[in-house]
Amino acid sequence: MMNRLRVYPFLPPAGATAFGLGTLAAGQHLWVLLPSCRQPDPEGPREPCPVGRVTVETMGGTGVVASTEPMPAVAGQAEGRRVQSFSIPSGVTQVRVKILRRDDGVRYEVNLEVAQFSHFDHPEGTSAHPGEFAFDLARYISN
C-alpha cells in the first residue's frame, strides 16, 4: 500500500549521512522517499501534495524514534520528491508508520516489526560525495 501512495521505505547505504541522517542518534536507520508537492491547479483533479509527511512511533520496546522533516530529494527542487530520515532505537521491536496528509490527517497506517526492515530495498542511486546521495528517481513512480 505504501508504494501505491508513492511512498518508498529504504535501508540507507552503510555509513550514509545524507538527508539529515547524520544528525540523528544511532539505531536502525530508515529513509522514506515521498511524492512531490506542487502548486495547486484549479483545473486539475490531482491533490497538490498527496503526502505531507510520515511518522514512525515505537510500539514494542522503549525509546523514541528520531526523525527529520521532509527535505528535497534533489537540492534546489522544493516542489520535487522529498525524503525523510528516521532512527529507531535499538531494542525497539515494533513501530507504527503513519502516512499523513499535509493537514496531518492519516492516509494510511501500519504496524511493522523492525525485523521486517531487512526486507526493504536499498535505494537505487549514487553517492558521489561523502554525506550525499542522489536517488535514481526514474526508478520510482512519482505523482
Image (cartoon, helix red, strand yellow):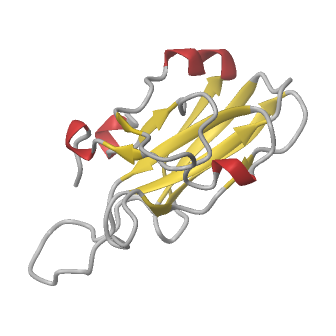
Along the viewing direction, whichever of 121 and 116 lies nearer the viewer: 121
The outermost residue toward the left is: 43
Q: Which residue occupies 33% across, 68% down?
A: 37
> The N terminus appears in which quarter of the rendering?
top left
Location of residue 79 by image quarter? bottom left
Q: Position of residue 91 (x, y in %)?
A: 86, 23
Left or right position of 66 against 13: right
Left or right position of 70 against 33: right
Along the viewing direction, whichever of 9 and 102 lies nearer the viewer: 9
Number of callouts: 0
**Above or below, comparing residue 22 to residue 50 in the picture:** above
**Above or below, comparing residue 52 to residue 8 in the picture:** below
> The C terminus appears in which quarter of the rendering?
bottom left
Q: Position of residue 100 (x, y in %)?
A: 51, 57
Along the viewing direction, whichever of 92 and 70 lies nearer the viewer: 70
The outermost residue toward the right is: 62
Q: Which residue occupies 28% across, 73% down?
A: 38
Q: Position of residue 14 (x, y in %)?
A: 60, 28
Q: Position of residue 11 (x, y in %)?
A: 54, 29
The outermost residue toward the bottom is: 42
**Above or below, comparing residue 54 to residue 58 in the picture:** below
Along the viewing direction, whichever of 73 and 126 lies nearer the viewer: 126
Q: Which residue occupies 90% across, 33% down?
A: 62
Q: Which residue occupies 49% across, 44% down?
A: 32
Left or right position of 3 against 16: left
